[in-house]
Image: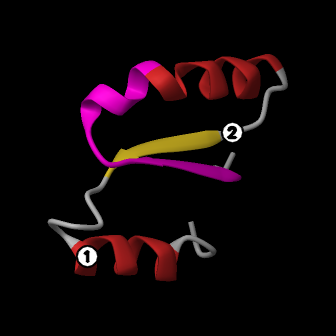
Amino acid sequence: MKSMIGIIMGSKSDFDIMREATTILDELQIPYETKVVSAHRTPQYMFNYAQEAYSR
């Protein structure tokens, strides 16, 4: 099944905070994907990710 939600973090260390979100999504059986993307260091990659999100 395609991911319905994208969880974007600026660094791996942010996952400790976002873990609760993934736990809830797992409980609700909502597919998601997690990505570490720095909008400050790699803005074009973040832009491309957002542009292509619907097709994923």
Give neighbour class at mark 2: few <14, some 14-19, many 20+ (Cα, 10 Å): some
Q: In screen coordinates, is 17 left or right of 3?
A: left
Instruction: Name the element at disc 1.
Output: helix
- Depth check: give the residue in front, 9 or 53: 9
Q: Quadrant of the C terminus?
A: bottom right
Q: In screen coordinates, is 19 left or right of 37?
A: right
Vertical side of 55 occupied by 37: above or below: above
Q: Position of residue 13 (x, y in %)?
A: 28, 27
Instruction: Magenta stretch: give its range.
Output: 4-16
In the image, what residue occupies the spot 49% across and 74% down? 50
Q: Position of residue 26 (x, y in %)?
A: 71, 21
Q: Distance between the residues labelled 1 and 2?
A: 25 Å
Check disc 1 and report the residue beneath it. 43
Check disc 2 and report the residue beneath it. 31
Instruction: Name the element at disc 2.
Output: loop
In the image, what residue occupies the spot 79% across and 17% down? 27
Q: Does the magenta stretch include residue 8?
A: yes
| Amino acid residing under circle 1 | Pro
